[in-house]
Structures are given as C-alpha cells and as structure tokens.
Image: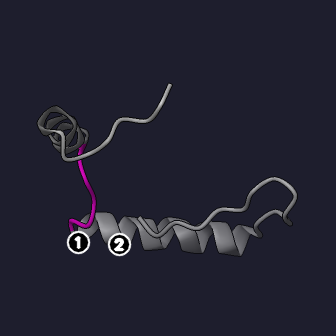
Amino acid sequence: MGINYKTKGQIAQTLEEYNSDLENGDSEIKQGKYTSAEQLKNEIKNGSVMEPER
C-alpha cells in the first residue's frame, strides 16, 4: 500500500497528511490492491517470498 510514514528524526505528520494517507490506503484496498495474509502464507510455503532473517 502506498501509505507514507515518517521515520524517527523527521517532523511528525500533520493531521491532514495522516488523513490523506488513510484515504489513499482505503482507496487501494477497495480496488483490491493488497496481498492477504493467506496469499503471503502460500507464497512463503511455495518459496516465492523469502522469509525475513531472525
């Protein structure tokens, strides 16, 4: 999803920026532009996605 966020050391988002990010994320979800947990599990099982190092 294209939700932007600020990292430590950067200026905090304004309420308007935050709400805009949420609206953009909602729009992507409504359009089906996301990967479900089940899809990710299947990709990991099939080896098409690398698991993070621990």
Q: Which residue is mark 2?
A: 27
**Is 50 displayed left or right of 24 in the figure?**
left
Residue at the spot x=26%, y=67% of the render? 33
**Which image quadrant is residue 39 in?**
top left
Predominant secondary structure, magenta span: loop
Mark 1 burial class by Cα count in 10 Å: few <14, some 14-19, many 20+? few
Depth check: 42 or 16 in front? 42
Report the side of 12 relative to 19 (left or right). Answer: right
Q: Quadrant of residue 16?
A: bottom right
- Look at the image and tell me in which quarter the N terminus lies: bottom left
Q: At which x and y percent is residue 27?
A: 35, 72
- Residue 20 placement (x, y as % from top left): 57, 74
Residue at the extreme top: 54
Front-most of 13 and 52? 52
For disc 1, the marked residue is 31
Q: Is residue 31 magenta?
A: no
Nearest the viewer among 25 and 40 is: 40
Amino acid at pointer 1? Gln
In the rendered structure, are the residues bearing label 2 and label 1 in contact, judged by CB atoms less than 8 Å apart?
yes
Q: Residue at x 60, y 68 (%)?
A: 19
SS class of the residue under badge 1? loop
Amino acid type at circle 2 is Ser
The residue under the point 43% across, 35% down is 52
Determine crowd level at label 2: few under 14, some 14-19, many 20+ residues with C-alpha closer than 10 A: few
**Which color scheme does this rendered protein use?**
one colour
Q: In the rendered image of this protein, does residue 53 appear above or below residue 48?
A: above
Which contiguous range is marked in magenta? 32-36
